[in-house]
Image (tube, rainbow, N blue to C red):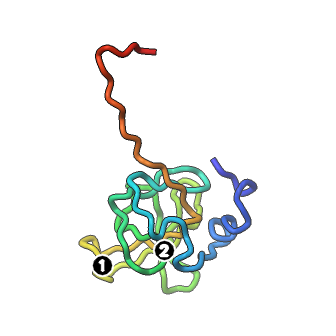
């Protein structure tokens, strides 16, 4: 688990300071591997790759979070809705509704630096003639 002291200055400015990374600059904006996105600070699973879509906004976009992983809070600007990791309060980005980009009509616009990606692991088949460890 990353603590505030183990975050890079850029990660801390986003996760703690609630800044936003530049559009189209994040590692996960145009990234389509199968797996789970977890909170960079506490490793809580936040989003699944099957809920990610290309919103062409410059940030990774998801139309659904993992149940109870993300909380919504009115943003300080009084207009937007901030999203945070439920477990540790890390700033993730913002959520938007009513854009009609997906069936769920929701876009979680998330900073790549707020997350880490854990790839799905394909299980290797076990054969009868293999010894168990």
Which residue is under mark 1? 101
Q: Residues within 10 Å of mark 1 (few under 14, many from 20)?
A: some
Between residue 49 and residue 83, name the one nearer to us: 49
* Spatial separation of the CA atoms under disc 2 and disc 1: 14 Å
129 vs 11: above or below: above
Local SS, label 1: loop
Horizontal and vertical percent for residue 48? 38, 56
User: Is 106 on the left or on the right of 76, as rendered?
Assistant: left
Which residue is under mark 2? 59
- Name the residue rendered at 47%, 51% in the picture: 45
Q: Residues within 10 Å of mark 2 (few under 14, many from 20)?
A: many
Horizontal and vertical percent for residue 41? 61, 55
8 vs 101: above or below: above
Horizontal and vertical percent for residue 93? 52, 72
Q: Earlier in the sequence, mark 2 or mark 1?
A: 2
User: Is 25 on the left or on the right of 127, as rendered?
Assistant: right
- Name the residue rendered at 42%, 58% in the picture: 47
Between residue 99 and residue 81, name the one nearer to us: 99
Local SS, label 2: loop
124 vs 101: above or below: above
- Name the residue rendered at 75%, 55% in the picture: 5
Q: Image quarter for residue 130?
A: top left
């Amino acid at each position: 688990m990353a603590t505030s002291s183990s975050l890079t200055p850029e990660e801390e400015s986003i996760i703690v300071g609630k800044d936003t990374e530049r559009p189209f600059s994040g590692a996960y904006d145009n990234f389509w591997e199968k797996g789970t996105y977890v909170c960079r600070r506490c490793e809580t699973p936040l989003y699944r790759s099957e809920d990610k879509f290309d919103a062409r906004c410059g940030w990774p976009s998801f139309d659904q979070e993992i149940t109870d992983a993300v909380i919504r809070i009115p943003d300080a600007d009084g207009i937007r809705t901030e999203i945070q990791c439920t477990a540790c309060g890390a700033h993730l980005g913002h959520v938007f509704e009513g854009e009609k980009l997906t069936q769920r009509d929701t876009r979680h616009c998330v900073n790549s630096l707020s997350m880490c990606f854990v790839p799905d692991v394909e299980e290797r088949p076990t054969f009868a003639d293999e010894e168990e460890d």
